[in-house]
Image (cartoon, grey):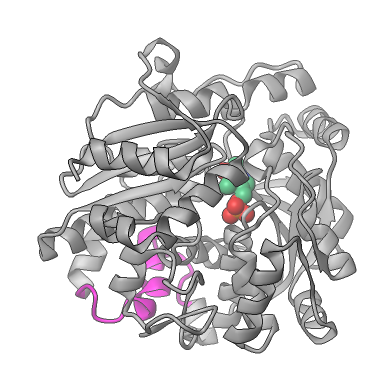
Amino acid sequence: MRYISTRGQAPVLSFEEAMLTGLARDGGLYLPETIPQMSTADIAALEGVSYEEAAFRVMRPFIGDTFTDEEFHGIIARAYAGFGHVARAPLKQLESGHFLLELFHGPTLAFKDFAMQLIGQLFEAALKRNGQRVCIVGATSGDTGSAAIEAFRGLDAVDVFILFPQGRVSEVQRRQMTTPAESNVHALAIEGHFDDAQARVKDMFNDFEFRDAVGLAGVNSINWARVLAQVVYYFTSAVSLGAPHRKVSFTVPTGNFGDIFAGYIARRMGLPIDRLVVATNQNDILHRCLSAGEYRPDGVIPSISPSMDIQVSSNFERALFYAYGQDGGAVAQLMDELKAGGFKVSQGALEALREAFDSGRCDEDETSATIRRVHAATGELLCPHSAVGVKVADEMRVPGTPMITLATAHPAKFPAAVEAASGVHPPLPERMSDLYERSERVTGVANDLGAIETLIKERTGH
Ligand SMILES: *Cc1c(COP(=O)(O)O)cnc(C)c1O
C-alpha cells in the first residue's frame, strides 16, 4: 500500500513513512493510492466480533508490510485496553430510529482517544524497531492535545509539545494537558485562537531545517493513521444496526473534517452509508461551503462547543482532492487561493461534494436547547458537540433509515455549558475524579514561530 499527497508533488510513501511524517513536504495530506474494498461478506462477518478484531480487519489492508499480523494485533490490543467500556464504542438508542455512538469512553473522554491511543502504540512499535527518536508537535482546540499527551506520556522515543489557545479550552481539557508529570510532556499556551496554533504548527513543518533538526512528527488530524483509526467505528456501529443488509446514515459534529472524512472512506470501502451529514456550530464555514460553494474564512467566534471552533478545516483538503478527480495541481491552487483569502469550488467539484455530504448548522441557543430537550425527554446528558450533532441529525433524519449521531465527548468534559443548559452537573467518571487537585505545568508562548522553535530546540537539546 502506497500513500500519495493531495497536492501531487511530495514523494510517494509507505504507511510507516506517511504515519511518522504527518504533513507531506509539498504542504499536502497523505491518502492511500487506492482504497481497499470490503465485500458484503467481509462486512457481514464483522457481526459479533470484538471491537479489536473488527479494527484489525478494517485497517489491515492499509498498513501494508509495516507490521506483521501478530504485531498489529498487539498494537490494537494495547491501544484500547485503557477504555472504560468493553464495547469501546457502544451504540445507544436515543429515540426511535436515532442512535448515539458513544465515542467518549477513552482515557480523555473524547473520540480523539480512538486515533491517538492507536497512534501512540504504532509510533512506539515503529520507532523502537528503527532506533529513532521523534518530537511530536500538535495544535489543539482542546481534545486532540489531551489525547496526544495521554497517548505519548512516558514513552522513551518521543517528546510531545502541544500548543493550545490560551484561555480558550475548558478547564478539564487544560488540566488533562497540564497535569501529567512526565518530563517528555510539554503543554504550551499560545496567545491567539486555534487557527493560530494550527498555522504555527504548519509553519514548523514547512521549515525543513527545523523539521529535520528536531525530528518533527505530526499527530494532528491530518495524520493519515488517525483518519484510519476512525474508520473502524463506522463499520462496527453500522453492522450492529443491520449493515451490510441495510443502509444507515451518520451525523458527525465537525471541525477539522477528520471524523466525517473517516466515514467517507468507510463508504468508499464498501460500507452502505446513505447520508453523511456534516454538523457545524456557529463557525459554519463547512456548511456555507457545501451550501454556496465558496470557502472563505471570516474569523472564529468562540462557542460552547470549542473543539469545533475552526475556520480552516485541514482535512477538507482530502475531500477536495476526491471532488476534483484526484487532481493534485487543482488542490494546490485552491490552497494558494486560500492563503490569499478563500476560494470558489468549481461546479463539478461542488456537485461531487454534495453527493457525498449533507450539512447543517446549530447555533448557541439551539445547542443549549438540545441539551435541555434531550435530557428532559430521555435522561441522556449530551456534551455540547454531540448536541450540535443531534440537532442537525433531527433535521436530516428520514423514516426507514437509522441515523447514528456520533457523541464525540463525555458531558463532564464541558460541565459549565451542560449545567447551564440542563441544570444538572455532569460528574467526572471515578477514574478521573482527582483531576482538579493535581498540580499544573504550562509554558506561555507568543504567536511567534521563531520563539516557539527556539523553545522546542532548547527543551529537546538541539
Ligand atoms: C475534535 C472534536 C470534534 C471535531 O472533529 P473533527 O475530526 O475535527 O471534525 C468534535 N467534537 C469533539 C468533542 C472533538 O474533540
Res. 84 image quadrant: top left
Does the magenta segment cover residue 217? no
Say left or right for 282 vs 252.
right
Say left or right for 240 vs 344.
left
Q: Identify the residue at horizontal 33%, vertical 49% (top origin).
A: 136
Say left or right for 53 vs 305.
left
Residue range in magenta is 45-68
Res. 252 image quadrant: bottom right
User: Can residue 82 be seen from the camera position used here?
Assistant: no
Res. 408 image quadrant: top right
**Between residues 172 and 157, which one lies in front from this camera angle?**
157
Residue 396 location in percent, x, y?
A: 85, 59
**Between residues 282 and 429, which one lies in front from this camera angle?**
282
**Between residues 431 and 335, which one lies in front from this camera angle?**
335
Residue 339 location in percent, x, y?
A: 67, 62
Q: Identify the residue at horizontal 22%, vertical 74% (top origin).
A: 69
